[in-house]
Image: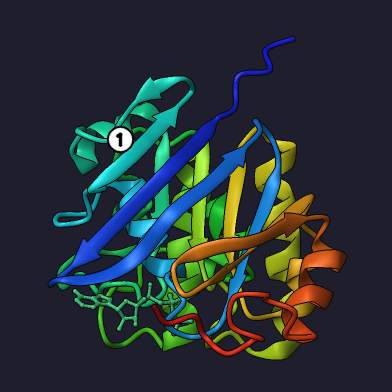
Amino acid sequence: MNDTPLLEMRHVSLRLDGRQVLRDVELTLSPGEIHVLLGANGSGKSTLAYLVMGCGGYRPENGELLFGGLSIAELPIHERARLGISLAWQEPARFEGLTVMEYLSLGSPKRTAAECLDRVGLPHQEYLLRMVDKTLSGGERKRVELAALLALGPKLAILDEPTAGVDMLSLGEIIAVVEFFCETGSTVLLITHQQELAEHADRASQLCGGRIVFSGPPEEVVAHYKARLCRRCDGETCHD
Ligand SMILES: Nc1ncnc2c1ncn2[C@@H]1O[C@H](COP(=O)(O)OP(=O)(O)OP(=O)(O)O)[C@@H](O)[C@H]1O
């Protein structure tokens, strides 16, 4: 059995515009797990996601970032994508002039656009020929973004608030999508404020003031977070 972690962050710190946003982050993701990242607004969750994806300007100032045992800290975003890292953005971009079918066929998709649309609750007959522009609602755009990741079948799917803007009756669909990623061999790093979604994870970590302050089973991390048990800041966002 291969027990090399899929993702390892060791003592990772990051500064943006002179501001210390991530501090000494330690995070390990095993292959096939669903790992939830919890934390207050501004605690650094999206920043951590952008850093793992390799977005421009998000380079660690300290520490190690390993993917399947390989250092990826210096790799640009497209090389990390080639290794199998994909990110569904908290606020997905719109692409004028591209149909949903074309968008879901970019890269080397492992699944058809039709299957992926159906899995995220968008009937393919209605959506394949829609444009990925402002004519899609915010919730539809979020679902198309999830469908795009499903199509790619990445090794690591980073989902930044996949339920934001999605109506609450559809939460079950999003949970099914997260579980489908896992069943089909993807590891999921899931950023969410939804307790119901968090409780479907295998493990969870709480970020506070740019630090991972607690990791463990999701129920314990949710309880720790909600009870404001962070020792460093008594539940208020940490400030140094
Ligand atoms: N380019 C930047 N320059 C300076 N500060 C930044 C920059 N980008 C983000 N920050 C700050 O870093 C902190 C972490 O932001 P981030 O977006 O990672 O938080 P988050 O945990 O994802 O929050 P939310 O739950 O609101 O989405 C915030 O205080 C934010 O203002």
Q: Residue at x 64, y 90 (%)?
A: 167
Q: Position of residue 226 (x, y in %)?
A: 76, 85
Asked if residue 111 is positioned above or below residue 130 in the image, the reply reads above
- Seen in the image, is 108 located left or right of residue 205? left
Q: Which residue is mark 1?
A: 80
Asked if residue 104 is positioned above or below residue 42 in the image, the reply reads above
**Quarter of the rendering containing residue 50:** bottom left
| Residue reaching furthest to the top | 1
Please tell me which residue lies in front, 111 or 57: 57
- Seen in the image, is 139 located left or right of residue 35? left
Q: Can you tell me whether the CB of the residue at mark 1 lies under 8 Å from the nearest atom of ligand 1?
A: no
Residue 112 appears anywhere in the view: no
**Quadrant location, the C terminus:** bottom left
How crowded pointer 1 is (Cα within 10 Å; few <14, some 14-19, many 20+) is rated as some
**Quarter of the rendering containing residue 166:** bottom right
Q: Residue at x 69, y 49 (%)?
A: 34
**What amino acid type is highlighted by mark number 1?**
Arg
Q: Position of residue 31 (x, y in %)?
A: 65, 30
Q: Residue at x 37, y 34 (%)?
A: 64
Q: Position of residue 179 (x, y in %)?
A: 74, 51
Colouring chosen for the image of the structure: rainbow
Q: Residue at x 21, y 49 (%)?
A: 59
